């Protein structure tokens, strides 16, 4: 039942109506109705026309026959030669006349007194019977006989007969009349044949048109139905794009599908952007929060550390103090380190980044990599000095490399590409470790979000803070067994220019 | 065949022009013209062709059958000596006695007689004699036919009726066969026809004659005789009589006689036709 209907939720509660049918059925159904109606209408009008024409033609044929007969019958009538008259009306009567284009049921020759002189059927129309006594149709006819203008014929249609009268005229004197008797529907046998043929032809046309229409309608409706389904899904999820083969034509329908695809694309971009904005907003808020907390901790921390230092230098050192003070000091140092890490400060006085700074990072981690038997692919293309602070960039690079080496796992693989243009420094570090699950992706750069068992989970957070403070962008892609972190940092003079222009 | 005939004619023509007494030769050589009554033969062209070929072969002379639509026309031809011989109905024979002499009478059923049959449609009940047809439509074959015209009118007179007003309407069909047809198709209520024609047709087309019913049979009349022009040379007349009467003696002739529904030909005798002559006299003919 459901398959017959369009599934959209808006209509789900309503009663079933023919107009709620799926287009897959509605289009071919409407097409079929139109085709059948057209075929029937055409056939019907043709048959009505044919019936009229047929009747007229047959009456004309019959009248022609009547005129020829009338001419031949003059002499027998003049000479009272009943037998010759009988032979004449019988020669042209019989199977030929009743089956062919005449359909003459009977021929009657009247004398001038309107009595039967001779007839093709003496049983029905006996000799010398006055016309009026042959039946109703003939009684009506007898009143019209004398009013037929010279040279003309008369056709009288009654309920059961069509009578044609041809006067027998010699030298402008009416000798008698010839009556051709037709059954009222005398053209019916020929019309039946004609109608039969028309029906066969119409049937053949329908047998061809209906399946073609059904196929065509389905073909038109299928993409629309798919489109409709996708549109309906749009509110809930982001549907897949339509297959390109579904409707490869450039008409309005094709344009509709193109528009749908464009809309879908835009929607995807927008969704991604929204997600990014949310993420960045969250990270920014976190940055502000952590920086605020760090500042608030820093002040008492400084006091505490000074106090511990004073105690160490000048205090009395009993057993407990000697044991507790180093513990305190180590704890405070650890707090200071963490606070320092949270208080990322990328800006500030620093020398400019050089090729060597990048190579130093490589050297620093070469030992770690060797221990883990990680295969390196190192590609440093920097030249000269870059308009970027060396310290924070080195920290970011070291974080990325360390993460990569750790993530790659034993005998893993790490690739690093560092290159620069006039406008931007690009760092790409990839590793062949486990793919990052999607649920972790969104919170990857948040503090303490690390999935590693080792480390404090602030490496990516710090990198993120630095890159953001340097107006750069950090991103990650992880799929098919390859995870790639990429950082793009605009040159500082560029940033200034941008800032100035902004 | 036609080519040979044509050459034959050409030879005759040359002989006529080259010989002073060519008339005799020419009369011997030209085809023998025999007038045929429009009996049932009219519709049996095959049979007529056979008979004509037989006579030509036996007479060693070409024979032509001359057909006319009515007895009257045949009688006119006799008056004009345009026929050498004719198969005539007995009534015209009586009327034409001044021009013709009887040659041979066919034997029908072994006897030189035939009758007049009064017929009506087989569907018509309640007609037992000609008197029951008063005010009806009646078909005659020919005004010079004994069995179809003279005999029924004579019968009406015997009953005290005026044959001209007894029927409501009468018409001529110009052949006995067609008179039967007029009754079979209900165009006429009744008709009088030649018993020989009716019986012969009953033999070959029984379903046709079955549509009619014989109401009464007349007395016997002499069978229509073969006559010759009084001016025909005696030898030719004798030859023709000899051939006709000899038909029963050979297979070919017997086969034709059988198809004609005749037994043989006999010498024509005046006494066969006395009853017809009486009727003609009474009719004022």
Image (cartoon, helix red, strand yellow):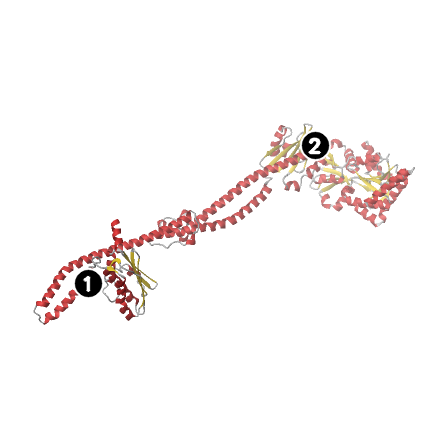
Q: Residues within 10 Å of mark 2 (few under 14, many from 20)?
A: many
In the depicted structure, whether residue A142 falls above or below residue A392: above
In the displayed structure image, the side of residue A449 where residue A134 appears, left or right: right
Q: Residues within 10 Å of mark 1 (few under 14, many from 20)?
A: some
Residue identifier under label 2: A74
Label 2 or label 1, whichever comes before in sequence order: 2
Q: Chain of mark 2?
A: A
Q: Chain of mark 1?
A: A
**Residue A7 is at least partly visible in this image:** no
Mark 2–mark 1 distance (CA, rounded to whole Å)? 139 Å
In the displayed structure image, the side of residue A479 where residue B36 appears, left or right: right
* Residue extending furthest toward the right: B20
Q: Secondary structure at mark 2?
A: helix
Q: How many marks?
A: 2
In the displayed structure image, the side of residue A166 where residue A34 appears, left or right: left
Q: Secondary structure at mark 1?
A: helix
Tell me, yes or no, whether dots 2 and 1 are on the same chain. Answer: yes
In the displayed structure image, the side of residue A375 where residue A155 appears, left or right: right
In the depicted structure, whether residue A431 falls above or below residue B230: below
Q: Which of B240/A344 is in front? A: A344
* Residue extending furthest toward the front: A384
Image location (x, y in percent) of residue A34: 47, 45
Residue identifier under label 1: A338
Q: Which of A108/A242 is in front? A: A242
The image quarter in which residue B75 lies: top right
Whether the residues at callouts 2 and 1 have beta carbons within 8 Å, the answer is no
Q: Which of A285/B241 is in front? A: A285
Image location (x, y in percent) of residue B99: 86, 35
The image quarter in which residue B237 lies: top right
Q: Which mark is residue A349?
A: none
Q: Nearer the viewer, mark 2 or mark 1?
A: 1
Image location (x, y in percent) of residue A223: 42, 51
């Amino acid at each position: 039942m459901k398959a017959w209907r369009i599934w959209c939720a808006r209509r789900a509660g309503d009663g079933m109506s023919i107009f709620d049918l799926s287009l897959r059925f509605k289009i071919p159904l409407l097409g079929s109705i139109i085709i059948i109606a057209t075929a029937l209408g055409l056939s019907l009008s043709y048959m009505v026309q044919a019936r009229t024409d047929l009747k007229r033609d047959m009456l004309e044929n019959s009248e022609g026959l009547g005129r020829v007969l009338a001419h031949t019958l003059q002499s027998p009538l003049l000479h009272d030669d009943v037998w010759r008259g009988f032979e004449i009306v019988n020669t042209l009567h019989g199977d030929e006349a009743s089956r062919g284009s005449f359909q003459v049921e009977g021929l009657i020759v009247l004398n001038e007194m309107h009595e039967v002189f001779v007839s093709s059927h003496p049983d029905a129309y006996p000799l010398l019977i006055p016309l009026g006594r042959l039946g109703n149709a003939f009684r009506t006819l007898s009143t019209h006989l004398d009013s037929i203008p010279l040279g003309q014929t008369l056709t009288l249609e009654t309920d059961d007969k069509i009578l044609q009268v041809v006067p027998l005229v010699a030298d402008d004197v009416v000798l008698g009349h010839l009556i051709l008797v037709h059954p009222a529907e005398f053209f019916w046998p020929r019309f039946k044949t004609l109608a039969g043929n028309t029906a066969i032809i119409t049937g053949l046309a329908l047998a061809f048109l209906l399946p073609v229409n059904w196929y065509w309608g389905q073909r038109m409706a299928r993409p629309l139905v798919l489109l409709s389904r996708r549109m309906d899904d749009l509110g809930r999820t982001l549907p897949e794009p339509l297959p390109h083969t579904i409707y490869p034509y450039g008409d309005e329908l094709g344009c509709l599908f193109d528009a749908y695809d464009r809309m879908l694309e835009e929607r995807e971009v927008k969704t991604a952007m929204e997600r990014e904005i949310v993420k960045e907003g969250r990270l920014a808020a976190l940055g502000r929060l952590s920086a605020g907390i760090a500042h608030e901790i820093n002040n008492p921390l400084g006091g505490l550390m000074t106090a511990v230092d004073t105690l160490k230098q000048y205090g009395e050192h009993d057993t407990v103090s000697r044991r507790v003070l180093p513990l305190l000091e180590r704890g405070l140092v650890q707090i200071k380190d963490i606070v320092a890490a949270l208080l990322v400060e990328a800006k500030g006085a620093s020398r400019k980044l050089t090729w060597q700074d990048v190579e130093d990072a490589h050297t620093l981690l070469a030992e770690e990599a060797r221990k883990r038997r990680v295969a390196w692919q190192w590609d440093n293309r920097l030249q000269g000095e870059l308009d970027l602070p060396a310290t924070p960039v080195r920290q970011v690079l070291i974080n990325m490399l360390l993460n990569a080496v750790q993530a790659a796992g034993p005998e893993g693989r790490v690739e690093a590409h560092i290159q620069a243009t006039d406008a931007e420094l690009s760092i790409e570090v990839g590793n062949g470790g486990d793919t990052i699950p999607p649920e972790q992706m969104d919170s990857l750069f948040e503090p303490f979000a690390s999935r590693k068992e080792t480390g404090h989970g602030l490496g990516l957070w710090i990198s993120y803070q630095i890159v953001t403070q340097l107006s750069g962008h950090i991103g990650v892609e992880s799929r098919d067994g390859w995870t790639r972190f990429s950082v793009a940092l605009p040159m500082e003079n560029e940033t200034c220019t941008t800032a100035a222009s902004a | 065949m036609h080519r040979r005939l044509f050459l034959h004619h050409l030879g005759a023509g040359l002989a006529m022009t080259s010989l002073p007494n060519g008339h005799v030769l020419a009369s011997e050589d030209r085809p023998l013209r025999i007038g045929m009554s429009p009996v049932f033969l009219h519709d049996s062209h095959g049979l007529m062709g056979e008979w004509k070929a037989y006579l030509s072969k036996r007479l060693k002379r070409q024979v032509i059958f001359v057909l006319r639509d009515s007895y009257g026309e045949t009688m006119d031809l006799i008056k004009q000596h345009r026929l050498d011989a004719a198969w005539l109905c007995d009534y015209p024979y009586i009327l034409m006695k001044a021009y013709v002499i009887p040659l041979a009478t066919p034997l029908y059923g072994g006897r030189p007689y035939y009758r007049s049959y009064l017929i009506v449609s087989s569907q018509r009940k309640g007609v037992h004699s000609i008197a029951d047809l008063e005010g009806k439509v009646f078909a005659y074959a020919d005004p010079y036919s004994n069995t179809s015209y003279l005999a029924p009118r004579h019968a009406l007179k015997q009953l005290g009726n005026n044959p001209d007003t007894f029927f409501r309407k009468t018409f001529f069909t110009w052949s006995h066969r067609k008179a039967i047809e007029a009754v079979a198709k209900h165009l006429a209520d009744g008709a009088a026809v030649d018993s020989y024609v009716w019986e012969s047709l009953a033999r070959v087309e029984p379903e046709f004659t079955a549509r009619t019913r014989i109401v009464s049979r007349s007395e016997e009349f002499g069978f229509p005789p073969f006559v010759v022009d009084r001016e025909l040379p005696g030898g030719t007349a004798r030859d023709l009589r000899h051939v006709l009467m000899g038909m029963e003696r050979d297979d070919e002739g017997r086969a034709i006689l059988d198809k004609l529904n005749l037994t043989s030909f006999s010498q024509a005798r005046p006494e066969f036709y006395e009853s017809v002559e009486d009727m003609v006299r009474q009719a004022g003919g």
